[in-house]
Image (cartoon, helix red, strand yellow):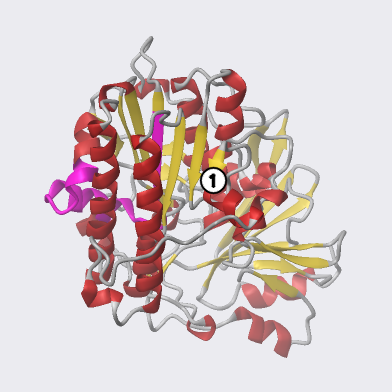
Amino acid sequence: MPASVDAFLDILLSPDLVEMVVRSTGPDAYEALAVDGSVAFNRVDGALTVDAVTGRNPLADQAVDRFVGADLEQSHRYPDRTANSYPHAYEVVAQVFDHPCAPDLCVIHTAGHNWEDQGGHRGEHGSLDVVQARAPFIIAGRGVQRLGFVDRACRLIDVAPTIAELLGAGPMLGADGVPRLDVLDDGTRPDHVVGFLFDGANPNVLYAMAEAGDAPNVARLIEMGTAFRYGAMSSLPTVTLANHTAILTGAHPGHHGILHNAWYDRARREQVITNSPATWAGARDWLWPTVNTLHEAVLGSRDDAFSASVNEPTDRGASWSTFDEIRSGSYQRPDLPPELPNATERFVRPVKEYRWSSKVDHIGMEHAVRLVSGDAMPTFLWVNFTLTDAAFHEGGPHSEIAAASVRDTDARLGRILDAVDAAGRMDRTAFVLVADHGMEETNPACTGDWGVALRDAGLRFRDEAYGFLYLDG
C-alpha cells in the first residue's frame, strides 16, 4: 500500500458524501472505515471473522429486511449510516480484493449522494447499502413451488445455481452461490427456463405495482411461483456488468473477472471499460475461464440443449445471441414502426434514454417471441430489458417515469409469456425475473466530488467508475 494512504483516508472520511472506505490491509485481511468507527476482519479457512472494532462498526448491521415496501422506503429517504444496513457486507467486501485489479481503496458513497458533477441522476446505485443492493427475485412455473410472496432474501449469486439445479445442469463451475432448494419442487424439472432481467428495477416499486394491478404480467409470474419480498442482494460494486455476470455465473465480481463497469489493469497499465455501447459486445472477453456461464453449463449437460441470449453482454457459450451477431457483423436491425407499441409516448419523445431503451427492448422482445415460437424453443433463454434502468435513473425509483417504464416492460414481458403459452409450452417452462441491482432516490442537495479535495491536497490517484481509487495510477 502506498505510504500516502493515511493522507487519503484523512480527507475521504471527513465529508458527508462518503459513507465509508473499504480496503485490503494484507492477504485475507480487510478493513472498513467510517467517520465514527472502523472494523478489521479476516478470512481464515474460508470463514470471515471480525478481528477488531474501533468506535462504531460500520458493517455491523447486515439486516436484509430493512426498508422493505415502497411506502417504508419513501418514508426513510437518504438514511444516515447509523440507520442503514449492509447485507452480506463482509463477504461482498472481501471478494472485491480477490481480483488482481482490485483498487487500493473502495469508496462507498452515502445513500443520498447525487453525482451532480458527473451528470448525476435522481436514481442511483453502486453503494453497499440495502436499497442499492436489493434486486427483485421471482421464480415461477414448472419445478417451482407456488408460495407467492415469502419474507426471505437471497443473493444474486444464487440465481445461476438455482437455474442450473432446475435444468439438471449443476453444479456451476466456480460459483459462490448455492441453489435455492427451498423454492423448488423436488423431482420436477422443466424442459425450458426463460429468464428476464429488468435492469435497475427497485423491487419495492416493482412488487407494489404488481400488487396494485399496474404490472399484471409480473403479478402473473408471482401467482405462478415465489417472490422474495426481501429481494436478492447484489455484490459490491452494485453496478450493471459486475452483477449481470454474477447472475449468469453464480460468482462474485472478484471471482468471475468483470470487476466493475470500469477498472484499472495495473499489469497492462490500461483502463478497462465494459459497460458502454462501444464495449458491450466485447465485455465477455474479460470473463475468466474459472467460471461457467449458465449457457455453458446447460449446453454441457445435455446433447440436445439449445441456449439463447437476447441483448445480454454476458453471453459466453450461448448457441445464439444478439451480441454474437453484432460481433460477426451479421446483425441487421429490423425496421421499427413509427410509434412503438407498449411505449409511453409522454417519455419516449422528450427523454433520449427512454426512447433508445424502448427501441432496444422492443427489438429484444421480438427476438424472444420468435425464439419461443419456433420449432426448437431454447432450453435456456435469457432476455435483458434496459428501459427500467434508464427511467429509474432519470426520475428516481418512485417517479412517474419509473412507473411508466415498469408498465411498458411488463407489457413486453406479457408478449413473451403469451408466445410461450401459444406454443403450448407454458406447463413445461420455468421463469425467472431478476434485476442486477437496486435503485435509490438521491438527494439533490447531496453533491460533491471527493476527487477535488484529494487533488487540492496534491494527491495523485486514479478514480475508476467513481469510487475505485488506485493510488499508484
Amino acid type of the residue tagged 1 in the rendering = Ser
User: Mark 1: which secondary structure?
Assistant: strand
Residue 212 in percent (x, y) is at 12, 51
In the rendered image, which quarter contains the C terminus? bottom right
Looking at the image, residue 395 sits to the left or right of residue 252; the answer is left
- In this figure, which residue is indicated by the disc labeled 1? 321
Furthest residue toward top? 187
Magenta extent: 193-219
Is residue 315 among the parts visible in the rendering? yes
Looking at the image, residue 349 sits to the left or right of residue 321; the answer is left
Image vertical order of residue 61 relative to residue 179, above or below: below
Figure quadrant of residue 399: bottom left
Is residue 237 among the parts visible in the rendering? no
> Quick check: is 409 in the magenta stretch?
no
> Quick check: is 196 in the magenta stretch?
yes
Looking at the image, residue 210 sits to the left or right of residue 304; the answer is left
Image vertical order of residue 300 relative to residue 204, above or below: above
Looking at the image, residue 57 sits to the left or right of residue 190; the answer is right
Q: How many marks?
A: 1
Of residues 215 and 177, the one nearer the viewer is 215
Residue 211 in percent (x, y) is at 15, 46
